[in-house]
Image (cartoon, rainbow, N blue to C red):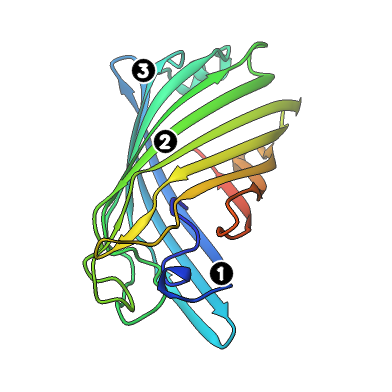
Amino acid sequence: MRSVSPVVGGAEFGVAGIETDVVSQSLILSRILDVGGRTGAVSLILPRAGIEAAAGRFRASDDGLGDIGFGAEVNLFGAPALPREEFRAWTPEPFASIHFIATAPTGTYDPDRRVNVGANRWSLTSTLNYSHTPDEGATWLEAYASVSVFTDNDDAPGAGGRLSQDTLVQFEGHASRNVSPDLWLSADLYYATGGATEIDGLALGNAADTLRLGAGLGWRLGALGQILFNIDAVVAKPDDQPDGWGLRLTWARSW
């Protein structure tokens, strides 16, 4: 989720002490490509989410299809495009890639609702990553830097005005280690800054400055693909920003 907490429909509209639960699922279809001898891919991201928010007597919820995303990425060095048979025998080495994800305002949206699954705006996120392995893939040290920009929502819920958001910058760090050929563990760090929102030029004072720590595991299931499980929680934030934690379960399979 690339947003600033609290979510739109909470403290941004004068509701203090809000608690928000978000359950989301995404189907991601990717096609691996040979881009001038480098590994690349294009992706279609189909999300669905349910949001429930509460603060005192205030209750709001929404459930439906989210904003469709379109992704493109290409390796910069270290991961050549190879046939599947050669890739299986390839010795992992450090690599870097660049990624782009654009989201379109296709999700369910009603300006009369206090919370919405859809954002009613476009966004573009660019990410640069570097992955280093000192021992041919048994250990990975990875760094990601992302910048997200947003168009305005000209029909903000409950406000009747224009909601705009500053650029959001995010950093990630991951350290993972193979426990066996089919099982690995990771330690994760996430930091977000910026992304403050305004309604008709009125600053809402909700810029991100949040550090989250987490852990994860991955398990290869042979022909069934692989399962990834991650958990993280906020460990440092401004006093006026909410606490939060998240769980993520991912199943990935190639054809």
Q: Nearer the viewer, mark 3 or mark 1?
A: 1
Disc 2 residue type?
A: Ser
Q: Is residue 233 above or below residue 156?
A: above
Which residue is painted at 64% across and 18% down in the image? 137
Q: Is residue 239 above or below residue 49?
A: above
Q: Which residue appears farthest toward the bottom when viewing the image?
A: 57
Q: Is residue 144 above or below residue 20?
A: above
Q: Which residue appears farthest toward the left when viewing the image?
A: 154
Front residue (pair 233, 117): 233
Q: How dense is the environment of label 3, judged by Cα within 10 Å: few (below 14), some, or many (20 and up)?
A: some
Report the Cα–Cα distance between label 3 and label 1. Answer: 42 Å
Which residue is painted at 64% across and 46% down in the image? 236
Disc 1 residue type?
A: Thr
Which residue is painted at 41% across and 66% down in the image? 8
Which residue is painted at 58% across and 68% down in the image? 21
Front residue (pair 192, 131): 192
Report the Cα–Cα distance between label 2 and label 1. Answer: 25 Å
Residue marked by disc 1: 20
Residue 3 is situated, as x and y percent measured from the top left of the image, at 43, 54
Report the Cα–Cα distance between label 2 and label 3. Answer: 21 Å
Labels 2 and 1: the sequence-earlier one: 1
Q: Secondary structure at mark 1?
A: strand
Disc 3 residue type?
A: Arg
Q: Which residue appears farthest toward the right when viewing the image?
A: 179
Q: How dense is the environment of label 2, judged by Cα within 10 Å: few (below 14), some, or many (20 and up)?
A: some
Q: Residue 15: tell me if it is visible.
A: yes
Residue 157: which disc? none
Q: Secondary structure at mark 2?
A: strand
Residue 146: which disc? 2
Residue 38: which disc? 3
How many numbered marks, from 0 up?
A: 3
